[in-house]
Image: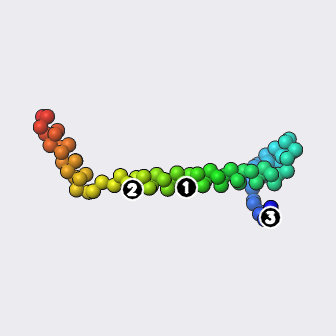
Amino acid sequence: METKTLIAHLPLPLAEKLDALADALDVPRDSIVTEAIANWIEREERQRIFTLQSLASSSIMVVEHHRVIDWADSLCADRVRSL
């Protein structure tokens, strides 16, 4: 698989944790960073799909304005009758 080199500026404490973890697991930093980015992208894509599905389903439930007004008026009328 072809690769592309990216440069990222990490806060020093995060870079030190990455180095320590890579050493402890005897895993290259590149592997950890690649896995982290892949997981982040997958999560963002799932969230985007979920958002689009939610928007699509909410547009199905669109109610005409006058029907909402009629419903709200009926609530007021019911409340007046119960007094």
Residue 2, numbered circle: 3
State the residue at coordinates (17%, 38%): 79
Residue 82 drawn at (x, y percent): 14, 34
For marks 2 and 3, give the CA distance: 42 Å
Q: How dense is the environment of label 1, judged by Cα within 10 Å: few (below 14), some, or many (20 and up)? A: few
Q: Residue 64 sits in which quadrant?
A: bottom left
- Count every numbered label the image shows and give the total: 3
For marks 1 and 3, give the CA distance: 27 Å
Q: Which of 21 and 73 is in front in this view?
A: 73
Q: Closer to us: mark 1 or mark 3?
A: 3
Residue 39 drawn at (x, y percent): 68, 50
The tag earlier along the polypeptide, 2 or 1, is 1
State the residue at coordinates (23%, 53%): 67
For marks 2 and 1, give the CA distance: 17 Å
Q: How dense is the environment of label 3, judged by Cα within 10 Å: few (below 14), some, or many (20 and up)? A: few
In this view, 65 is above or below 71? below
Residue 44 drawn at (x, y percent): 60, 54
State the residue at coordinates (58%, 51%): 46
Q: Element under label 1?
A: helix
